[in-house]
Image (tube, rainbow, N blue to C red):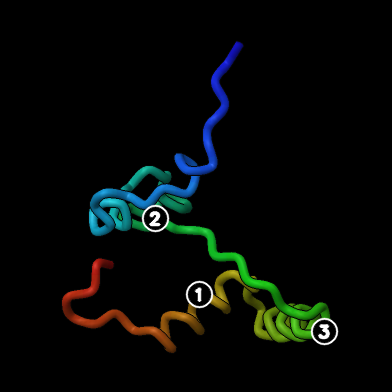
Amino acid sequence: MSERPTRKSFASRPADPERWIKATDVRPRDGEAGGFTARLTIDITPELRGRIKIVAFRRGVTVADMLRALLAREFPATEGDPS
């Protein structure tokens, strides 16, 4: 009989958050050195999703690339950030 993970172990916080944030346990995107990514999920309305997809199509970019650029503009790296 295999042991099932407990809810506590699933939701436990890392002992060293700085090290956990910087962890490189994912492969680089598109062979780009240092291009590690993390998935971000948000809930939006179907109407907003449609508008975003249309704008990305008109600009000739993917939704993901367009939103990455938007987030990078809105939240620029500052000195001392863990990124």
Task: Measure how far apart labels 1 and 2 are at the Cα level.
Answer: 13 Å
Q: According to the image, label 2 marks what residue?
A: 36
The answer to which of 44 and 77 lies nearer the viewer is 44
Sequence order check, earlier mark of 1 and 3: 3
Q: Position of residue 53 (x, y in %)?
A: 74, 78
Residue 41's label in the rendered image is none
Sequence order check, earlier mark of 2 and 3: 2
Task: Measure how far apart labels 2 and 3 are at the Cα level.
Answer: 30 Å
Q: According to the image, label 1 marks what residue?
A: 68
- For label 2, the crowd category at 10 Å Cα-Cα, with few meaning under 14, some 14 to 19 and many 20 or more, is some
From what the image shows, is residue 12 above or below residue 83? above
Could you tell me which residue is drawn at 50 percent across and 75 percent down?
A: 68
The answer to which of 39 and 59 lies nearer the viewer is 39
Q: Position of residue 64 (x, y in %)?
A: 59, 69
Q: Quadrant of residue 49?
A: bottom right
Q: According to the image, label 3 marks what residue?
A: 47
Q: Please, which residue is most extreme toward the left here?
A: 80
Could you tell me which residue is drawn at 24 percent across and 67 percent down?
A: 82
Q: Amino acid at mark 2?
A: Phe
Could you tell me which residue is drawn at 33 percent across and 47 percent down?
A: 24
Q: Amino acid at mark 1?
A: Arg
Q: Secondary structure at mark 3?
A: helix
Q: Position of residue 34 (x, y in %)?
A: 31, 55
Sequence order check, earlier mark of 1 and 2: 2
Q: Quadrant of residue 27?
A: top left
Q: Position of residue 13 (x, y in %)?
A: 37, 52
Quadrant in the picture for the N terminus: top right
Quadrant in the picture for the C terminus: bottom left
